Structures are given as structure tokens and as C-alpha cells.
Image (tube, rainbow, N blue to C red):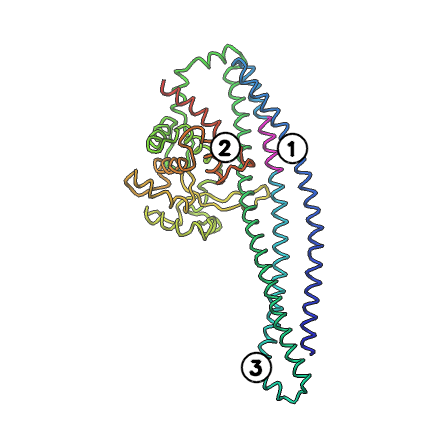
């Protein structure tokens, strides 16, 4: 009887603990909700201002191509980009708030689960003790009939208690799994937003540089600007000899050489050369930490064993380096990105010009090899271009109308508008590259 009372007391204490937890969490959730509401207000205002600048840009582009209008366009572009940086920071703060809330919920559920497991241990011990005594033994132990039935009833109560605990454990485990899946998704959102913020910041710097270069070239005079516009032969030469900023190809590549390789990949896939170059440029621009892990003399913290996701990329990376006879411990790969506080966000391990992670490269290598007739190498420029083109074709980039969607899916696997800067910027780069390519072919 004392044992049963002890078990009942355990259940009562557990029930009171479980009832108290949600109240404490609700207060935290309420604070988080207030922060999210304020962030949503900020986002709406930023979106309104961005729309205003988009209208200004559209109006300016329709005006006569003069130095004053070009400068006006660059100023509007910079203002819009600065607002987009603010927008992404707000979205990142929103995601971080959700991330903290989910992590807190997981911690609470984990504590509940641990307590349930302890309780189940106590109940199972009692059941084991009861199992050591058969009903006949209990009946013959000298107890009167009422005592016998009381003990049998106690045995049934213990079984019922165990059933309740098992049910609670299953429900908590299911809840915990769902919250962990949510956490993984939120971490992916965080990684994507950090990448977008990085691209936007670089684009602001590029716009400022373009404005400064324009003013230096023209000395602020309209005649100089118009003269520079009309000098197409000189422009074509400059375009062809411009160094194309590729990752880890082992040599400097001119824009003209890059176009030739893109044209070759396009001939096998139907993906437009300008669009392919735009995607690869965007991936390169994600890149101050590209190729800066797993090099000779790097610390252990930058080893491929640390920077790659173990369950996804370790085995494919071993296979890739082995098939190419590359030293696995000194073949450079990308480092993970860092947030504003310097914390690791997501995983690194991307390889070569197209920045394929090992597991994705393993899926496309056979298709590359079927065309190239050799072992696919993610650090080889032609193989990287071809693999990207094959991948983009599968995402819908076989015609120009599908390019934006393909770019978005290439980046994040979806067309989530939180990341639309990536797709928009690729389309803009593709337009610029198409003009340059057309200039080269005149």
C-alpha cells in the first residue's frame, strides 16, 4: 500500500510540474510575439519604401541616357539596396527569435521526457518485483481474501500507470521530433538570410564603386560620358579581357574565356550562357570564405571533418578526392558562413567554381562524365560549368521565362520570397552579361 501511495505521489508531482511549465513558457512566447509584431511593422514600412525606389528606378531607366540620369539611377539603386539590407536584418532577427523560442521548447520537452523515463523506471521496477510473486504465492502468504484482492488491484493500478506513462512518452517524443524538424528548417532560413545579407552588402559596395568610377572616367562632363558610351570597339576589348572572378580554377580567366566555356555547356543543355555566368558569379560573390578551409596548415577547426555535415557529405567527399587522387586533408573547400556575432551558420564544404557540396556533386557527376568522357572534377572549370547547367536545366532554366524560378531553387530549393534578392540579382546580372556577350559578338 505504501508503495502504491509513493507511485501516486510521483504522478501527482509530475502533473503539477507539467502544468507549471507551459505557464512560464507562455510568458516567454508572449514577449517573443510582441517582438515579432514590431518586426512585422518595420518590414511593412521597409517594403513600402523599397516599392517607391523601384518605381523611381523604372522611371529613370525610361529617361534619356545622360550622365545625370545615370547618377540618379545609381543613387536610387544604392538607396534601395540599403533598405533591402535593413529588410534582411529584420527578417534575420525574426528568424532568430523563432529559433530561440523553438530551442526553449525543445529544452522543456526534453526535461519532461527525462522525467517520464525516470518514472517509467520506478514503475517497471515495481512491476518486476510483483512479477517475482505469483498470485498463488500472494494468496498463500497468509493474507486474508480482502488483502489478496487489494494487492491484485494494486498490481492492476501499476499496469494502468505504466500505460499512461507510455502514452505520455509517445506524445512527447512525437512533439519533440516535430519541434526538432522546425528547428532544422529555421536554421536553414537563418543560413539563407545570412547569405542574402552578404550579397546585398557586396552589391551596395559595387554600386558605390561604379558611381565613383563613372565620375572619374567622365570627370563629371556629359560629353565625356557620351563619348565613352559610343566607343564600342574599345568596350568590346575591355569586356573580353576583363578578369572573370571564378573560384579555385587554378588560373585567372578572362570573361571571353568564361563565355566560351559557358557556350559549350549551353550547347549540351540549352541553358542560356549569360544566365549560367550570372549564377556562377552570384555563387562566387557568396565567397570571402570560399576555399579557405581544409588547406595545408589550416587548424583542425577548419578541417573537412569539422566544416562539412558528417551524415551528408563526409563519405561523398572521400569518394570524390579518392577518384581524383587528391589529398583529402589539403584540398580546399568552403568554410561555413558566420553571423554578425561570429557564430557558425550552417555547414561548409562546397567545392570549386560552382560551389557544389559533395553529396550534390555525387548526383551530377555521372551526367557530366557521360558528356565529357572523363572522371568529373568539381574543381575543373568545364566540369563545374556543365554540372551547373545540367542542374539548372532540371530546375526549369531551359528557357528564359523559367530562369528566375530556377535561380531561386538553385539557392534554397524553393521560391520563398524572403530570398528573392538572389533570384532578382541573378536576372539583373544575366541582362548585363547578355549585353556584354552581344557586344563581343558584333
Left or right placement of residue 67 versus residue 436 in this view: right
In this rendering, does residue 375 appear at all? yes
Give whichever of discs 2 and 3 has the lower sequence position.
3
| Residue of label 1 | 44
Q: Nearer the viewer, residue 381 or 117?
A: 117
Disc 2 and disc 1: Cα gap in Å? 21 Å
Looking at the image, residue 85 lies above or below residue 98:
above
Q: Which quadrant is home to the N terminus?
A: bottom right
Residue at 68% across / 68% down in the picture? 11
Residue mark closest to the camera, 2 vs 3 = 3
Determine which of the numbered discs, if any, sits on residue 423 in the image: 2
Q: Horizontal and vertical percent for residue 367?
A: 33, 41
| Residue of label 3 | 132
Circles 2 and 1: CB distance less than 8 Å? no
Q: Nearer the viewer, residue 330 or 135?
A: 135
Residue 167 lies in quadrant? bottom right
Residue at 69% across / 71% down in the picture? 8
Secondary element at image label 1: helix
Give whichever of discs 2 and 1 has the lower sequence position.
1
Left or right placement of residue 203 versus residue 18 in this view: left
In this rendering, does residue 197 appear at all? no
Residue 372 lies in quadrant? top left
Q: Is residue 367 magenta?
A: no
Q: Nearer the viewer, residue 289 or 13?
A: 13
Secondary element at image label 2: helix
Label 2 neighbourhood size at 10 Å, few (<14), some (14-19), many (20+)? Answer: many
Specify start and end residues of the magenta stretch as a single range.
79-90
Q: Horizontal and vertical percent for residue 245?
A: 43, 32
Amino acid at each position: 500500500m505504501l508503495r502504491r501511495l509513493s507511485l501516486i505521489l510521483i504522478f501527482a508531482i509530475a502533473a503539477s510540474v507539467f502544468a507549471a511549465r507551459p505557464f512560464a513558457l507562455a510568458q516567454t512566447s508572449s514577449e517573443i510575439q510582441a517582438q515579432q509584431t514590431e518586426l512585422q511593422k518595420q518590414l511593412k514600412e521597409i517594403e513600402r519604401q523599397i516599392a517607391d525606389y523601384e518605381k523611381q528606378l523604372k522611371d529613370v531607366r525610361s529617361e534619356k541616357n545622360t550622365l545625370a540620369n545615370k547618377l540618379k539611377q545609381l543613387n536610387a539603386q544604392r538607396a534601395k539596396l540599403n533598405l533591402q539590407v535593413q529588410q534582411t536584418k529584420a527578417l534575420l532577427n525574426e528568424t532568430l527569435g523563432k529559433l530561440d523560442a523553438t530551442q526553449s521548447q525543445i529544452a522543456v520537452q526534453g526535461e519532461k521526457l527525462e522525467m517520464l523515463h525516470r518514472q517509467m523506471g520506478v514503475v517497471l521496477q515495481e512491476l518486476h518485483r510483483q512479477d517475482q510473486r505469483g498470485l498463488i504465492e500472494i494468496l498463500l502468504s497468509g493474507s486474508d481474501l480482502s488483502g489478496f484482492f487489494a494487492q491484485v488491484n494494486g498490481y492492476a493500478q501499476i499496469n494502468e500507470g505504466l500505460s499512461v506513462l507510455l502514452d505520455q512518452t509517445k506524445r512527447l517524443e512525437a512533439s519533440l521530433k516535430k519541434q526538432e524538424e522546425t528547428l532544422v528548417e529555421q536554421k536553414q532560413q537563418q543560413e539563407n538570410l545570412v547569405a542574402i545579407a552578404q550579397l546585398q552588402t557586396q552589391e551596395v559596395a559595387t554600386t558605390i564603386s561604379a558611381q565613383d568610377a563613372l565620375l572619374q572616367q567622365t570627370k563629371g562632363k556629359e560629353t565625356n560620358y557620351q563619348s565613352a558610351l559610343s566607343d564600342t570597339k574599345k568596350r568590346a576589348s575591355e569586356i573580353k579581357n576583363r578578369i572573370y572572378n571564378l573560384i579555385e580554377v587554378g588560373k585567372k580567366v578572362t570573361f571571353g574565356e568564361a563565355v566560351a566555356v559557358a557556350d559549350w555547356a549551353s550547347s549540351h543543355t540549352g541553358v542560356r550562357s549569360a544566365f549560367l555566368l550570372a549564377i556562377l558569379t552570384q555563387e562566387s560573390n557568396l565567397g570571402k570564405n570560399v576555399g579557405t578551409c581544409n588547406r595545408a596548415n589550416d587548424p583542425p577547426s577548419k578541417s573537412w571533418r569539422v566544416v562539412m555535415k558528417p551524415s551528408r557529405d563526409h563519405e561523398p567527399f572521400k569518394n570524390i578526392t579518392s577518384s581524383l587522387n587528391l589529398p583529402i586533408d589539403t584540398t580546399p573547400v568552403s568554410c561555413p558562413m558566420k553571423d554578425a556575432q561570429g557564430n557558425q551558420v550552417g555547414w561548409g564544404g562546397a567545392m570549386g567554381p560552382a560551389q557544389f557540396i559533395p553529396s550534390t556533386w555525387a548526383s551530377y557527376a555521372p551526367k557530366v562524365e557521360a558528356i565529357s568522357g572523363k572522371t568529373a572534377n568539381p574543381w575543373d572549370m568545364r566540369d563545374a560549368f556543365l554540372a551547373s547547367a545540367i542542374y539548372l536545366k532540371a530546375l526549369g532554366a531551359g528557357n528564359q521565362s523559367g530562369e528566375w524560378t530556377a535561380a531561386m531553387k538553385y539557392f534554397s530549393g524553393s521560391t520563398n520570397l524572403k530570398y528573392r534578392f538572389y533570384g532578382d540579382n541573378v536576372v539583373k546580372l544575366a541582362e548585363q552579361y547578355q549585353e556584354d556577350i552581344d557586344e563581343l559578338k558584333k
